[in-house]
Image: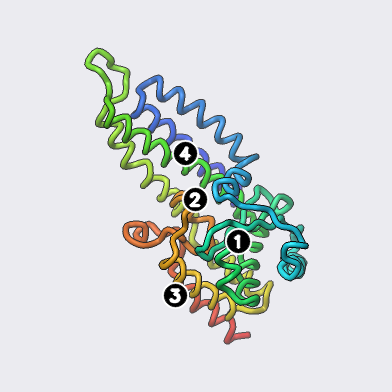
Amino acid sequence: MNRMKTYLLLAALTSLLVVAGQAMGGKGGMMIAMAMAVIMNVGSFWFSDKIVLSMHGAREINRADAPEIFSMVERLVQKAGIPMPKLYVIPEDSPNAFATGRSPAKGAVAMTEGILQALSIDELEGVIAHELAHIAHRDTLIMTVSATIAGALSSLGNMAMWGAMLGGRSHDDEDGPSPVGMIVSAIVAPIAATMIQMAISRSREYMADEAAARYSGKPFALASALRKIESWSKQIPMHSGSPATAHLYISNPFSGGLASLFSTHPPTAERVARLEAMGRRA
């Protein structure tokens, strides 16, 4: 099912890139967008994890840097039945974390400096277990591929806006970019990028929460972590990444305002309620 989702998502993103390219540059823009789509479809499969980690300035850590965390992850991966992932730290004060990698064998978990400071060790274990669940469920390929290409769509939107402001098609150039089309692309492309993230079922977050509770045996700790992350994220903004990468995180770091209407995550209150119900049943 996840493989089919990936193919459908790549087809949709490719089509959007081509349409945006045509709106921006006419036939020439469409051909450039098609070539760009082919390169990105191939490149995002093999390198999307590296691209996303680089976007966030993530730094790989080893056992000497965080022995307690490494021991924790080793316990959790045994329960999840996956290889040990690489661990990264993101230089951000906003507490959050995400997983990436095209397969469990290539998995990686990235945590912000803020989350290491804001959460207790039990809460952090719940968060890491959630990210390992995404790796075990093979969610990470579609998450990272969509983040890479949706980010390109957002960039195209910005380019279109500048192109419309600085000039447009001349009267003699029927195949050139239309200023109206460029403005429409500038508005639609970022919204389309967000809608693509929503197309990835929110149910995967519930499934990862449930699996994390099983791996760690601490559903109440994960529920507490989700509350803290949401609260602190509203006070401390995330500087790296963009709304196109919001769906990667355990909690949307770019929520609020218009973004809340296109949330890539289920409401935190609902996730917490489910986790606490699991804890009471246990």
Residue labelled with disc 2: 241
Mark 3 surroundings within 10 Å by alpha-carbon count, few (fewer than 14), some (14 through 19), many (20 or more) = few
Q: Amino acid at mark 2?
A: Gly
Residue, x 74% and y 51% (percent of image)?
A: 105
Which of the two marks, 3 or 1, is nearer to us in this view? 1
Kind of element beneath mark 3: helix
Q: Amino acid at mark 3?
A: Ala
Query: How much space separates mark 2 and mark 1, taking CA atoms?
Result: 13 Å
Residue labelled with disc 3: 269
Q: Please state which of residues 201 and 158 is positioned toward the viewer in this rendering.
A: 158
Q: Amino acid at mark 1?
A: Met
Quarter of the image where one finds residue 237: bottom left
Q: Is residue 167 above or below residue 185?
A: above
Q: Please state which of residues 281 and 120 is positioned toward the viewer in this rendering.
A: 120
Q: Of marks 2 and 1, which one's residue comes earlier in the chain?
A: 1
Residue 276 numbered tag: none
Q: Of marks 2 and 4, which one's residue comes earlier in the chain?
A: 4
Residue, x 64% and y 63% (percent of image)?
A: 133
Q: Residue furthest top?
A: 172
Residue labelled with disc 1: 111
Q: Of marks 4 and 1, which one's residue comes earlier in the chain?
A: 1
Q: Amino acid at mark 4?
A: Ala
In the image, taking residue 24 as reference, residue 124 lies left or right, namely right
Q: Residue furthest left?
A: 171
Quadrant of image for the C terminus: bottom right
Q: Is residue 239 above or below residue 9?
A: below
Mark 2 surroundings within 10 Å by alpha-carbon count, few (fewer than 14), some (14 through 19), many (20 or more) = some
Residue 64: image location, x then y, percent: 77, 62
Query: How much space separates mark 4 and mark 3, taking CA atoms?
Result: 32 Å
Kind of element beneath mark 1: strand
Kind of element beneath mark 4: helix
Residue 261: image location, x then y, percent: 34, 59
